[in-house]
Amino acid sequence: PWHVAKNRADKTGVVIADLLARTEVDSYVLIGHSLGARAMSVAAQTLGTKTDGPRLEAVHLLGAAIADDIDGNALTAQVDDAVYNYHSANDKVLKYLYTLAQGGQTAAGLSGFASSHAKLKNTNTSDHVERHSDYHTTVTLL
């Protein structure tokens, strides 16, 4: 079930990028939590491959179920401001379940992005986020 959900999130991200690229709007802000954050990161990466697609003002990822060593250039290619990653060391879903399901890989939503890319902005929310579901009620987007 995890790998099915992960694959669906990846496919959803590609579909979102395709839909956004078909609009007449100049820019968007993408926001997602957990696997939704995964879908938004895939959407951002996919839009980065389209020369005529819309820009992204910013991307906000909360408790992101994506690898912490993601390619910063691919993720930020179409982003004007930054990709904000809100992470918490208290997130047991990412700490145990994601790590186990991904063969020991660390989630960006647990520890932040490992890359020091200028447009990847880590925000440690461990003081406020105790559980994976706390992001919605305790985090204010930058």
Image (cartoon, rainbow, N blue to C red):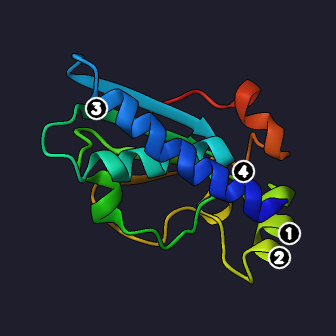
Sequence-earlier tag: 2 or 3: 3
Q: For residue 110, which quarter of the picture?
A: bottom right
Residue toward you, 25 or 81: 25
Q: Which mark is residue 100?
A: 2
**Residue under circle 3?**
21
Residue type, label 4: Ser
Q: Earlier in the sequence, mark 3 or mark 1?
A: 3
Asked whether, in this view, residue 14 is left or right of residue 130, the answer is left
Q: CA distance from mark 4 to mark 3?
A: 35 Å
Between 132 and 88, the one lying in front of the other is: 132
Which residue lies under the disc numbered 1? 96
Relative image position of residue 67 (x, y in whole percent): 57, 68
Q: Which mark's residue is nearer the viewer, 1 or 4? A: 1
Q: Secondary structure at mark 3?
A: helix
Q: Earlier in the sequence, mark 4 or mark 3?
A: 3
Residue at 56% x, 61% y is 112
Where is residue 31 shown, x and y percent of the image?
52, 32
Crowd around label 3: few <14 · some 14–19 · many ≥20 (10 Å): many
Identified by mark 1, the residue type is: Tyr
Give coordinates of residue 8: x percent, y percent: 65, 50
Disc 1 secondary structure class: helix
The residue at 30%/61% (across/down) is 74
Query: Alpha-carbon distance for marks 3 and 1?
Result: 36 Å
Which residue is identified by label 4?
Answer: 126
